[in-house]
Image (spheres, grey):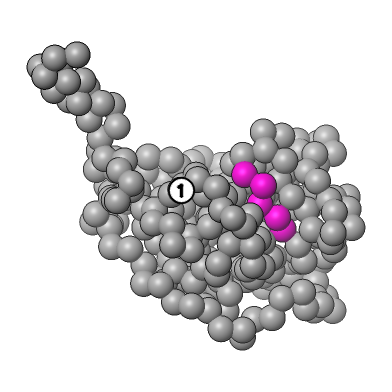
């Protein structure tokens, strides 16, 4: 290949993959997020500050008395994949994503709720940026709170663990090293819907390893990749809790939920 061909090839690749680079992952060709100055997955959006979490939120603790236990380490009887049995592995008190088997959801639906779960990503880690042990928690099956190994793993800000994916980066990056159990505590207020139209967005508060990453942030709509999130007609006011199969062997344990019906009135 001569130098002119090389230049043309570089220009072509630059057009096809406009901004994804190892030192500054993200995009510059995506639309601006509604109500914000940043683009979706903006490569220039500032990285969240790294905070080493303490031990304020303990792991493996028992659920409150009125919680609905969704996974106690023994079986996936509360979970499904589109009506079929959930196909993920259960062993050693945790469930593990079996890549390419698909996302799973709770059989039950919930409106507003308090959710607790714990996750761990493999050690040593595999891949980088969004490819490093990606999963996610899908609220109402629609809105993603990212699960990703973000320990010494730069990625675009609104894809960092603790984010509302593609909408709000976490306030800080509270990731622990790979292999360690992380705790997620999520307080979710369902959207208010009138005549099929959203009149009040969903709100979410997220605490990762005892560190607040979202404080009652408005959710802009169902998760989108490289596109602007917006609510669609007939948005539901309740839905399942989902866990994402992004092809990586992420583990989950100790999952429980407390419905907060008072917020649904
Ligand atoms: Mg994800």
Q: Is 79 rendered above or below residue 18?
A: below
Locate residue 207, reporting x and y percent.
Answer: 55, 73
Image spot of residue 238 (x, y percent): 66, 53
Relative depth, front residue between 194 and 239? 239
- Report if residue 40 is visible in the image: no
Q: Is residue 76 visible?
A: yes
Give the residue furthest to the front: 2
Q: Residue at x 71, y 76 (%)?
A: 59
Query: Is residue 242 on the magenta stretch?
Result: no
Side of 119 relative to 24 (left or right):
right
Quick check: 209 left or right of 47?
right
Q: Quadrant of the C terminus?
A: bottom right
Residue toward you, 130 or 265: 130
How far from the left and from the top, in percent, is residue 194? 54, 52
Residue extending farthest left:
4
Q: Is mark 1 within 8 Å of ligand 1?
A: no
Tell me which corner region of the image, top left, top right, bottom left or bottom right, holds residue 16.
top left
Report the magenta stretch's main SS.
loop
Q: Position of 148 compared to 96: left or right? A: left
What's the magenta region?
Answer: 248-252
Name the residue rendered at 43%, 53% in the picture.
159
Q: How far across and down, in percent of the image, does residue 71 sit?
A: 81, 60
Viewer-proximal residue among 84 and 3: 3
Q: Return the residue at label 1.
A: 128
Identify the residue shown where x is 67% and y is 38%: 99
Give the answer, above or below, for where 19 lies relative to 255.
above
Identify the residue shown where x is 59% and y is 55%.
124
Q: Secondary structure at mark 1?
A: loop
């Amino acid at each position: 290949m001569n130098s002119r061909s090389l230049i043309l090839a570089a220009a072509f690749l630059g057009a096809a993959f406009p901004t994804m680079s190892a030192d500054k992952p993200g995009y510059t060709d995506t639309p601006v997020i509604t109500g914000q100055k940043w683009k979706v997955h903006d490569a220039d959006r500032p990285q969240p500050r790294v905070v080493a979490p303490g031990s304020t939120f303990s792991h493996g603790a028992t659920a409150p008395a009125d919680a609905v236990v969704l996974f106690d380490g023994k079986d996936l009887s509360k979970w499904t994949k589109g009506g079929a049995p959930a196909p993920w592995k259960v062993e050693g008190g945790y469930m593990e994503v079996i890549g390419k088997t698909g996302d799973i959801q709770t059989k039950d639906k919930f409106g507003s709720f308090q959710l607790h779960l714990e996750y761990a990503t493999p050690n040593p880690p595999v891949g980088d940026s969004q490819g490093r042990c990606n999963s996610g928690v899908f609220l109402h099956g629609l809105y993603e709170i990212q699960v990703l190994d973000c320990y010494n793993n730069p990625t675009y800000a609104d894809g960092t663990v603790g984010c509302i994916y593609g909408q709000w980066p976490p306030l800080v990056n509270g990731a622990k090293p790979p292999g360690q159990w992380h705790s997620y505590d999520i307080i979710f207020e369902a959207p208010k819907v009138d005549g099929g139209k959203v009149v009040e967005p969903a709100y979410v508060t997220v605490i990762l390893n005892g560190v607040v990453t979202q404080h009652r942030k408005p959710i802009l709509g169902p998760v989108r990749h490289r596109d602007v999130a917006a609510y669609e007609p007939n948005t539901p006011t309740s839905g399942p809790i989902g866990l994402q199969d992004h092809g990586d062997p992420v583990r989950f344990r100790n999952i429980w939920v407390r419905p907060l019906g008072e917020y649904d009135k």
